[in-house]
Image (spheres, rainbow, N blue to C red):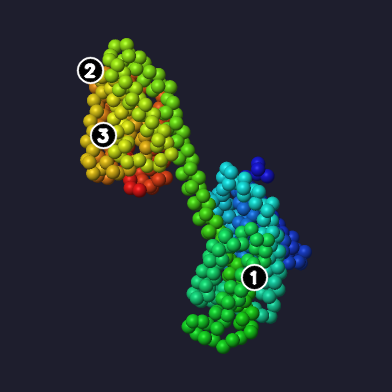
């Protein structure tokens, strides 16, 4: 099944619907149950391919069949030409194609991935009652509705007009939507692991649809009609279908919102883990450590004991800062700036005449917050990608404007360009998006390269 494309599955089931319609018509038997079975099979296959939960699959089974029933009646009138069998076949084909693609679009947009997808597959074993409930409910409704709609109760009435009249009562519709949303909300905490969840849901739908039917039948709140049992029975069928449709739509919307939140949370965790990994790599960066030890060796050989001690303390301060803030999302600009100065001091020992730095940060901006180690990463990138020499010093500036802090360096690319993946900037960008929904600004000109970081608050 994995090798068959979804498009082929949808087209295939649309053709199967047409074949079932023609064969049942030629045999002189009703095709409603056969079409219902084919539609349910299409929903289940698409749901399995997209790793949807059994609850969402069951909801989709109910929703797709109800919408298919309503659309089928509406589209049938569009093809009011030729033989009735051809009219029925064309309407069935179009409705099946439409429902199949809409369901797949929803499933592709909100299907879970990774570990969540595995949990979804496992849910089929634990919550199969939802699927059984959906299948039995759809068959029962289809048999009942076919019997009622073809009986004397609906004789002389247009089902589409009755449905529109029912939905025209805003009080009833609002009641159904609000009640369904509230039930689904509390159900996540109360009924989710309860064996009788299917029974509770069925009772809830019947009660809400009955209440909505009474509102429409009496014409509340505007008309206050006399009660009519025939009108009540007609409206009860429409009300049941309407409530099941509304409940299914609300449930799927709630599912979509939950999946969006989970996807956003997983993305934030992934970006956070990537940033922590990058920071950890910097802590044990062999090039930085190798160069630092070489510089230290030169200081020990050529300079005083005080200079060597000062260098060691600054090197230890860099690693201490990284260890202290590896689990922090944000740090004050004051702390990050002190860390950046220590890093600059170490680099200047390696390039005593090839590096010129300036810091112009207003005192009131020092309490703002940024992502830890970002200034050091930007300084490291500037030195990594540009030539540093006494004849042409590399100029780097750090400045703030009250809302942002900017790291700018002149462009003097090295003759042999180092490999660049762009991951450093991307990680910083992801951190700001995840933590504050803020964007960093990268500007590159022929002469300079600058990155502007927003100053954040707690």
Q: Which residue is mark 2?
A: 391
- Quarter where residue 384 is shown: top left
> Measuring 55% from the left and 83% from the top, which residue is drawn there?
218
Q: Can I make out residue 233 in this image? A: yes
Residue 345 x %, y %: 28, 25
Q: CA distance from mark 3 to mark 1?
A: 66 Å
Q: In this orientation, which residue lies closer to the viewer: 270 or 350?
A: 350
- Quarter where residue 373 is shown: top left
Disc 1 on helix, strand or loop?
helix
Q: Against 151, is 401 above or below?
A: above
Q: Residues within 10 Å of mark 3 (few under 14, many from 20)?
A: many
Q: Which mark is residue 203?
A: 1
Q: Residues within 10 Å of mark 1 (few under 14, many from 20)?
A: few
In what quadrant of the picture does the N terminus appear? top right
> With 406 as the anchor, is 10 left or right in this view?
right
> Measuring 33% from the left and 45% from the top, which residue is drawn there?
456
> Measuring 40% from the left and 45% from the top, which residue is drawn there?
435
Disc 3 versus disc 2: nearer the observer: 3
Q: Earlier in the sequence, mark 3 or mark 2?
A: 2
* Residue farthest along the bottom direction in this orientation: 226
Q: In this orientation, which residue lies closer to the viewer: 371 or 425?
A: 371
Q: Can I make out residue 42 in this image? A: no
Q: Against 424, is 36 above or below?
A: below
- Quarter where residue 450 is shown: top left
Disc 2 on helix, strand or loop?
loop
Q: Which mark is residue 398?
A: 3
Q: Earlier in the sequence, mark 1 or mark 2?
A: 1
């Amino acid at each position: 099944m994995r090798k068959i494309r979804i498009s082929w599955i949808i087209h295939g089931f649309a053709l199967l619907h047409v074949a079932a319609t023609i064969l049942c018509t030629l045999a002189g038997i009703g095709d409603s149950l056969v079409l219902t079975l084919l539609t349910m099979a299409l929903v289940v296959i698409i749901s399995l391919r997209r790793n949807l939960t059994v609850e969402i699959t069951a909801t989709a089974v109910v929703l797709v069949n109800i919408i298919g029933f309503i659309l089928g009646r509406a589209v049938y009138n569009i093809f009011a030409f030729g033989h009735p069998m051809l009219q029925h076949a064309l309407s069935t084909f179009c409705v099946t194609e439409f429902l199949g693609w809409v369901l797949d679009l929803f499933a592709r947009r909100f299907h879970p991935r990774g570990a969540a997808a595995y949990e979804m597959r496992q849910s089929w074993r634990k919550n199969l009652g939802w699927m059984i409930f959906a299948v039995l409910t759809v068959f029962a409704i289809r048999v009942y509705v076919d019997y009622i709609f073809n009986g004397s109760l609906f004789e002389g009435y247009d089902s589409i007009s009755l449905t529109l009249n029912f939905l025209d009562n805003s009080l009833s519709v609002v009641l159904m939507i609000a009640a369904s949303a509230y039930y689904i909300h509390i159900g996540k905490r109360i009924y989710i692991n309860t064996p009788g969840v299917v029974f509770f849901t069925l009772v809830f739908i019947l009660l809400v649809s009955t209440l909505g039917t009474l509102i429409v039948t009496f014409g509340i709140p505007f008309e206050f009609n006399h009660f009519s049992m025939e009108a009540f029975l007609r409206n009860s069928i429409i009300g049941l279908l309407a409530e099941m449709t509304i409940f299914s739509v609300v449930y799927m919307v709630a599912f979509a919102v939950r999946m969006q939140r989970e996807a956003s949370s997983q993305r934030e965790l992934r970006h956070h883990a990537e940033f922590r990994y990058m920071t950890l790599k910097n802590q044990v960066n062999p090039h930085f450590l190798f160069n630092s030890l070489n510089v230290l060796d030169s200081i020990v050989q050529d300079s005083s004991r005080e200079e060597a001690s000062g260098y060691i303390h600054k090197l230890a301060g860099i690693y201490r800062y990284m260890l202290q803030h590896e689990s922090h999302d944000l740090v004050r600009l004051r702390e990050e700036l002190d860390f950046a100065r220590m890093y600059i001091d170490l680099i200047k020992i390696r390039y005593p005449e090839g590096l010129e730095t300036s810091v112009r940060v207003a005192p009131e901006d020092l309490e703002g917050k940024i992502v830890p180690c970002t200034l050091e990463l930007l300084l490291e990138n500037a030195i990594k990608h540009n030539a540093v020499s006494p004849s042409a010093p590399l100029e780097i500036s750090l400045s703030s404007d009250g809302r942002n802090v900017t790291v700018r360096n002149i462009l003097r690319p090295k003759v042999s360009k180092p490999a660049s993946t762009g991951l450093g900037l991307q990680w910083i960008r992801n951190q700001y998006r995840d933590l504050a929904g803020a964007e960093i600004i990268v500007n590159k000109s022929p002469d300079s390269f600058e990155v502007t970081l927003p100053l954040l608050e707690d």
